[in-house]
Structure formats: C-alpha cells, structure tokens
C-alpha cells in the first residue's frame, strides 16, 4: 500500500519530458525505435558540464532534477 501524495499529473509531465529528451539524444523518433535501435553517444565529464544548462535563473526547482 502506498500513501497518497497528491495528483500524478506533474510527475507524468516530468517523465514525458525526460523521455522526449532521451529520444532526441539517441536519435529515435518513436518509442519502438527507442527499444530496437538507439544510438548512444558517450561524452566526457567535461563535455557533459559544457552541454549542461547555464546562465539560467530558476524560480522553482523541479522535483526530480539535481545538477
């Protein structure tokens, strides 16, 4: 049994955003493509820091994101 923690809409929105971003990263247009032929690209830690969002002022942190 799981205690009620509020509406699930915000969590679903975050999950869909993450899925869309991932599909873009691996070059897949559909979920089926994602299952069968993703194209992963390994980047260095420096590359990851460089490609990370910067110079943005956040007014409210998303509940499922840590930098």
Image (spheres, rainbow, N blue to C red):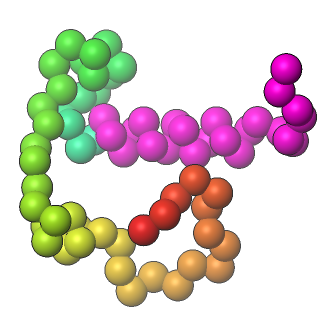
Q: What's the residue at 20%, 37% (across, down)?
A: 26
Q: Is residue 65 above or below residue 3?
A: below
Left or right relative to 20: residue 40:
left
| Rendered view: 21 above or below 52 | above
Is residue 35 depicted above or below 40 in this figure?
above
Whether residue 37 is in magenta: the answer is no
Q: Which of 64 and 24 is in front in this view?
A: 64
Q: Provide residue 67's location: percent of width, then percent of height.
A: 42, 68
Location of residue 50 in the rendering, given as x and y in whole percent from the top left corner: 20, 74
Task: Identify the residue at image location x=52%, y=59%.
Answer: 65
- 30 relative position to 56: left or right: left
Which one is in front, 28 or 6? 6
Taking the image as shown, residue 36 lies to the left or right of residue 55, namely left
**Residue shown at the point (74%, 38%) measured from the top left:** 9
Residue at left offset 14%, top offset 71% = 46
Q: Where is residue 54 in the image (x, y as percent from the top left)?
A: 35, 80
Magenta region, main secondary structure: helix
Q: Give the range drawn in magenta.
A: 1-23
Residue extending furthest toward the front: 1
Give residue 27's quadrant in the image. top left
In the image, taking residue 21 as reference, residue 2 lies left or right, namely: right
- Up the image or down, 50 lies above or below 10; here it is below
Write down the quadrant of residue 56 in the picture: bottom left
């Amino acid at each position: 049994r799981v205690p009620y923690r509020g509406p699930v809409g915000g969590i679903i929105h975050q999950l869909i955003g993450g899925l869309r971003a991932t599909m873009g990263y691996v070059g897949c247009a559909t979920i089926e493509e994602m299952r069968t032929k993703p194209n992963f690209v390994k980047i260095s830690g420096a590359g990851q820091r460089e490609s990370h969002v910067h110079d943005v002022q956040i007014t409210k942190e998303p509940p499922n994101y840590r930098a």
